[in-house]
């Protein structure tokens, strides 16, 4: 990129230096006016511009580093103004950004920030949290409109919170098409969370001399592209300030501030807003996780399995009719059906039994892995398009693995949900973008038909849990029936009891202990540790980038990875150690008679061993991140697993394929 194609916003200035930070090779045209006097034309020494002491500090702190760890400040005597200096390296240059610092009352800003962070941390509802965030940011920045835009799975944006204090129109409840957030823009926000356009109509500054070539794509002061200027003008905004909202899995959304006039945002205020946005995002994700956990528990509680030998198990048909109303409420469904061995038991509004049988045969043939299958648009889905289901638009189907050779199915059905979507503006084509008037566009609506409500991720997880419980209930009923009617066929009864125990204590995919069984073993070890003081440890680990493996190679390869991993780890443990599948791609090792040194040695050995694992059809390495928690007096299974979980995620944040030991519990 040549400098005559690189324009800069005029509220700051840019210097382009050689890699040793000694010679000025180019500078923005406004540098002299900003600092109160024209610098020597390049190549001039930096000392004459910034002073010897600041230049030495810049070279020292940037030595061997891609960018300064934090901004430097200095005062220019000629204009009696304090400035902030940021610097980073490009391929062949060092780029220095300089901004004037206005007096904001640092102590007051810090106190205000702390007070608002406390308020965010105390929020108990997601809507309340985001409403307070936009109000706090609006009070800090003074923008006319502050909005939070949340991305859906297709990268369409929905305005979920807003605070206005000016003439700009409201956007809350409106949507922005995914074309407004192209991949390059999203990646730019992942690299640099904060973006400020102080005045979209202001003249921009070039770098001089123009023949110097430098990449300014990471420069904070870079001027907005022509299409971004047109876009903001269509929104009626002259200035914009935005902060990325990052989750553990990527870009969650954006907080953006707009004003109809030029609007500066001082660096300390930008830092304060970024801190507020980070805290609010983490709090929102925590509140969502708690809400999902409560929902999952409600689904679990909807089917309480009887463990009493005196209570006769209920038939699947009895269970379905007793629980149908509750299940339909939990899954927002109009009907539910259970398909077993070619027969259908149903409740509510469902398709004809013959249609359900055809649907199950198609899903069973085309969906071989153990997860749920779902669609919200049966007319457009190849498996369902030719089936007669006039009253259904959404289907969620959960396989019930009764035996290795038999799968029953639990199915939920949803009706059409006609939805009106309000869009903030009509998408523009490249051909018409410059021809449209520069003015706010009225919101326009789109009516979506032929679809049900979307099946949320937590609903699919809950359906899997319900399917596992129902599988156990069906197996228990079959055992009871065998006990009553086939007493003389002892062999068949023994096999059925063995199958039930396998379902109750072993994970059906990996054949290692399931969560219930490993929790039993941990509880027993806790009792022994409390009585005899025998130390033990828990190693919690999961497969790094497992979702990417599933997405790239398919769930069949993903299942092969879990099976091979479990077999490798189980065969490498001592006889007194135990392996269990905790859930998904997570496993836990109970290492008895192990102190911290022994547990860490075992963890490192397992990590190294897994790195040697090869799975057919997978051409990328398999690694795990391991969290180690050592028992200490007063520990419960919950506290041990919680500390191991924190350590495991610390290992992931530190680069994955590593072992981290949990911090001691602080009572």
Image (cartoon, rainbow, N blue to C red):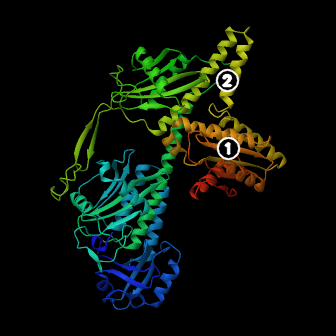
In the picture of the structure, the residue carrying the numbered disc 1 is: 588
Is residue 179 found left or right of 571 in the rendered image? left
Q: CA distance from mark 2 to mark 1?
A: 23 Å
Mark 2 or mark 1: which comes first in sequence?
2
With respect to residue 129, does 138 lie above or below? Answer: below
Q: Quadrant of residue 189?
A: bottom left
With respect to residue 51, does 271 lie above or below? Answer: above
Is residue 517 found left or right of 213 in the rendered image? right
Q: Residue at 26% x, 54% y: name it.
A: 170
Disc 1 packing (10 Å; few <14; some 14–19; many ≥20): many
Q: Residue at 47% x, 27% y: name it.
A: 366
In the picture of the structure, the residue carrying the numbered disc 2 is: 500
Marker disc for residue 204: none
Query: Label 2's element?
Result: helix
Is residue 219 found left or right of 543 in the rendered image? left
Query: Label 1's element?
Result: strand
CB-based contact (under 8 Å), mark 2 and mark 1 = no
Disc 2 packing (10 Å; few <14; some 14–19; many ≥20): many
Q: Quadrant of the N terminus?
A: bottom left
Percent across and percent down for residue 322 are 52, 20
Check the image and name the residue furthest to the right: 532
Percent across and percent down for residue 652 are 58, 54
Closer to us: 345 or 387: 387
Percent across and percent down for residue 31 are 32, 83
């Amino acid at each position: 990129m040549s400098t005559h194609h690189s324009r800069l916003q005029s509220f700051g200035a840019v210097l382009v230096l050689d890699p040793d930070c000694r010679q000025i090779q180019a500078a923005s045209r406004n540098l002299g006016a900003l600092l109160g006097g024209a610098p020597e034309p390049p190549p001039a020494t930096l000392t004459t511009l910034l002073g010897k002491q600041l230049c030495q500090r810049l070279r020292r702190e940037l030595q061997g580093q891609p960018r300064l760890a934090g901004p430097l400040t200095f005062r220019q005597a000629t204009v009696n103004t304090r400035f902030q200096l940021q610097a980073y390296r490009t391929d062949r240059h060092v780029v220095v950004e300089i901004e004037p610092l206005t007096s904001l009352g640092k102590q007051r800003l810090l106190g205000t920030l702390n007070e608002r962070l406390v308020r965010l941390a105390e929020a108990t509802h997601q809507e309340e949290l985001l409403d307070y965030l936009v109000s706090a940011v609006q009070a800090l920045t003074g923008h006319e409109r502050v909005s939070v835009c949340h991305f859906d799975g297709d990268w369409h944006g929905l305005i979920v919170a807003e605070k206005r204090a000016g003439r700009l129109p409201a956007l809350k409840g409106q949507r922005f098409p995914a074309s407004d957030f192209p991949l390059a823009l999203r990646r730019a926000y992942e690299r640099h969370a904060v973006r400020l356009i102080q005045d979209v109509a202001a003249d921009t500054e070039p770098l001089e001399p123009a023949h110097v070539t430098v990449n300014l794509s990471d420069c904070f002061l870079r001027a907005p592209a022509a299409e971004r200027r047109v876009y903001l003008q269509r929104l009626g905004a002259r200035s914009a300030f935005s902060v990325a909202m990052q989750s553990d899995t990527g870009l969650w959304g954006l907080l953006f501030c707009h004003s109809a006039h030029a609007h500066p945002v001082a660096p300390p205020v930008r830092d304060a807003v970024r801190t507020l946005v980070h805290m609010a995002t983490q709090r929102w994700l925590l509140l969502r996780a708690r809400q999902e956990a409560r929902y999952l528990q409600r689904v679990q509680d909807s089917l309480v399995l009887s463990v009493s030998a005196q209570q006769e198990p209920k038939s699947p048909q009895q269970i379905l009719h007793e629980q149908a109303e509750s299940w339909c409420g939990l899954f927002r469904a109009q009907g539910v059906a259970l398909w077993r061995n070619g027969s259908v038991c149903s409740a509510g509004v469902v398709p004809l039994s013959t249609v359900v049988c055809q649907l199950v045969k198609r899903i069973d043939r085309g969906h071989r892995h153990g997860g749920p299958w779902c669609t919200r648009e049966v007319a457009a889905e190849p498996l369902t398009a030719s089936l007669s289901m006039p009253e259904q638009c959404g289907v969620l189907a959960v396989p019930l693995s009764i035996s290795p050779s038999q799968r029953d199915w639990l199915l939920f059905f949803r009706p059409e949900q006609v939805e009106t979507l309000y869009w903030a503006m009509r998408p523009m084509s490249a051909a018409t973008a410059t021809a449209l008037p520069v003015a706010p566009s009225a919101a326009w609506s789109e009516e979506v038909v032929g679809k049900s409500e979307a099946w949320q991720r937590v609903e699919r997880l809950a359906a899997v849990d319900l399917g596992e419980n129902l599988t156990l209930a069906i197996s228990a009923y079959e055992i009871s029936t065998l006990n009553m009617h086939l007493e003389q066929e002892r062999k068949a009864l023994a096999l059925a009891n063995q199958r039930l125990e396998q379902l109750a204590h072993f994970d059906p995919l990996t054949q290692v202990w399931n969560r219930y069984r490993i929790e039993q073993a941990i509880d027993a070890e806790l009792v022994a540790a409390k009585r005899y003081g025998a130390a033990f440890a828990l190693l919690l680990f999961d497969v790094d980038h497992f979702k990417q493996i599933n997405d790239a190679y398919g769930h069949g390869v993903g299942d092969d990875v879990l099976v091979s991993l479990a077999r490798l780890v189980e065969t490498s443990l001592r006889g007194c150690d135990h392996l269990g599948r905790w859930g998904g791609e997570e496993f836990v090792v109970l290492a008895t008679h192990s102190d911290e040194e022994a547990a860490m040695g075992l963890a490192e050995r397992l990590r190294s061993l897994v790195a040697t694992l090869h799975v057919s059809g997978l051409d990328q390495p398999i690694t795990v991140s391991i969290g180690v928690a050592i028992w200490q007096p007063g520990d419960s299974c919950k506290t041990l697993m919680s500390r191991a979980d924190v350590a495991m995620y610390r290992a992931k944040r530190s680069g994955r394929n590593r072992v981290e030991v949990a911090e001691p519990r602080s009572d």
